[in-house]
Structure formats: structure tokens, C-alpha cells
Amino acid sequence: MSQGKVVLVACGSFSPPTYMHLRLFEIAKDYMHSFGLGTIVGGIVSPVHDAYGKKDLVPAPHRIEMLKLSLKSSSWVKVSEWETQQAGWSRTRVSLQYHQDTINKHKSSHNLNEDPPSWLPDDILNVNNIDEPDNLNQMLNGNVSDDVTVKLLCGADLLESFATPGLWSDEDLETILGRYGIVVVSRVGSDPGRMINESDILYKYRRNVIVISNYITSDVSSTVIRRLVRRGESPKYLTDDAVISYIIQHGLYGARSQIKN
């Protein structure tokens, strides 16, 4: 059953962004359109606040700039700086609520003088850059609210953390899974079905968990890129060349000018 208009939101460190971070959006859009699960009207990458305190988390301005460099060729995924501009770390459910409320407020607003946030999807701005499915009218069928729903886009590692007792608050999980839903792209060696079956909270909201098998497997991660950079080895073809140049230019992750080309 179609879930109407959907914006995919990925939250995380992105220190640095990798090609796989961005591939998740394309995989999810193709899958949801192919199976009539909703029409994707935009994608948002929301990097975490510096106060999150994760190891090797470079300052937000660097992560934002690297994301923007990575997304120059994307016609539908944008970077939201909202989390990084708050007084401290924001819980994922709060970020999802802010982005959904802001999108729907803009859609219903008649104040044309109000500047929209830079991350607002072009489709919401009536630019329509994203490729909508050919059967969109049939999918919506006039029965689905025109409101946009945001869904948390993630890899199987985040789903696994949902199933870990005590790692997430009950309120967070109830809100994220019950109100918004998640789209999970599986990784090598993961078993999302088992995770859902063994977790009471995931099983309760299993209808709001869309699991996608990624058959083009890759173990590329930010950790791998940081390790290569730290060792003076080349991370080429794991992330955008512009991101690599930025890392070297600013000496991030222990980068040295002699990184192999």
C-alpha cells in the first residue's frame, strides 16, 4: 500500500561521507517506487551536532562542506544544517519531527515572502527535479493525504542498535517507528529479519520497517577512509575526489600531503 509522499532523512556523523552513504538514497527510492510503497519527493542528509562527541568527529562546518561537495551531482538529496546549529545534540526523533513539521508547514503556508530553508526538497518548492514513478496517480489514488511523511533512512547497523536493550529510550523508539517509520538497506552479513523477530519493539512496528536487500555489496565506511588517510594511503574511489581534496587541504583525520594518488 502506498504511503503517499515521502522524504527520506539520513542522520549520522558523515565524517567523512562515503559513496555508500549516498547510494542508500538511490537504492531506497528505486525500491519504494518499484513496489508502490510511496513516492519519494526528496532526500535530506542531517549531520549530527559536534556535541555528539563521537571519536574522529571533525567540526560540523567541515562535514557539511564535504557533504555538499559529495551531493553536487544529486538533483534531489540536500544537506540540512539544522542539527548542527542547535545548542547541543538533538535526538533523532526530534530531528525527524522538525523536518516533517517544517516541510508540511511550508506546503500549507501562504506567506510567499517567507524564505524556505535551503534543505527543502525541490519537489516541495514545485521545482520537481526528482523522477516520480510513472504510476504516481494510481499509487496515490486520491485517498492519501497530501502531507509529506519523513522516514529515517539507515543501514542495518542502526536497526541492530534499535534492538539493543537500553541503547535507545522507549519514547524515541515508539516515536521513530510508530510515527515515522524506517527504511533499512541491509549490509553484508546482516540479518534484519532476525533482528525484527527478536526485538519486541521492532516486531510491534514491523509494518513500518521497510527492509531492502542491497545486492551490490560494499564494506566502504567512514572508518575505512579515515584509516587510509591516517596511514597516508589513497581513499580514491571510496568517496568523491572533491572530498579527498578537501580532507588533504584541511589536514583532516591526520591527512598528510604525501597521500598516494
Image (spheres, rainbow, N blue to C red):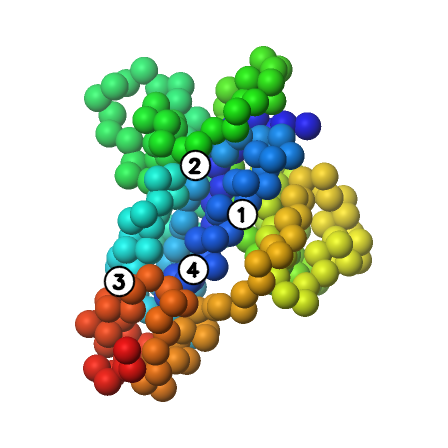
Mark 3 surroundings: few (<14), some (14-19) or many (≥20) residues within 10 A: few
Image quadrant containing the N terminus:
top right
Kindly identify which numbered label has been placed on residue 235.
none
Q: Identify the residue shown where x is 65% and y is 53%.
A: 213
The CA span between labels 4 and 1 is 12 Å
Mark 4 surroundings: few (<14), some (14-19) or many (≥20) residues within 10 A: some
Indicate the amino acid at tag 3: Ala
Identify the residue under disc 4.
Answer: 19
Mark 1 or 2 closer to N-term? 1
Q: Identify the residue shown where x is 40% and y is 19%.
A: 108
Q: Are marks 3 and 2 in contact (CB under 8 Å)?
A: no
The answer to whether residue 24 is above or below residue 237 is: above
Marks 4, 2: nearer the viewer: 4
Kindly identify which numbered label has been placed on residue 42.
2
Residue 61, located in which quarter of the rendered image?
bottom left
Identify the residue under disc 1.
Answer: 27
In x, y percent, where is residue 165?
70, 62
- In the rendered view, does 93 fall on the left or right side of 49? right
Q: Are marks 4 and 1 in contact (CB under 8 Å)?
A: no
The CA span between labels 1 and 2 is 13 Å
Question: Can residue 168 be seen in this snapshot?
Answer: no
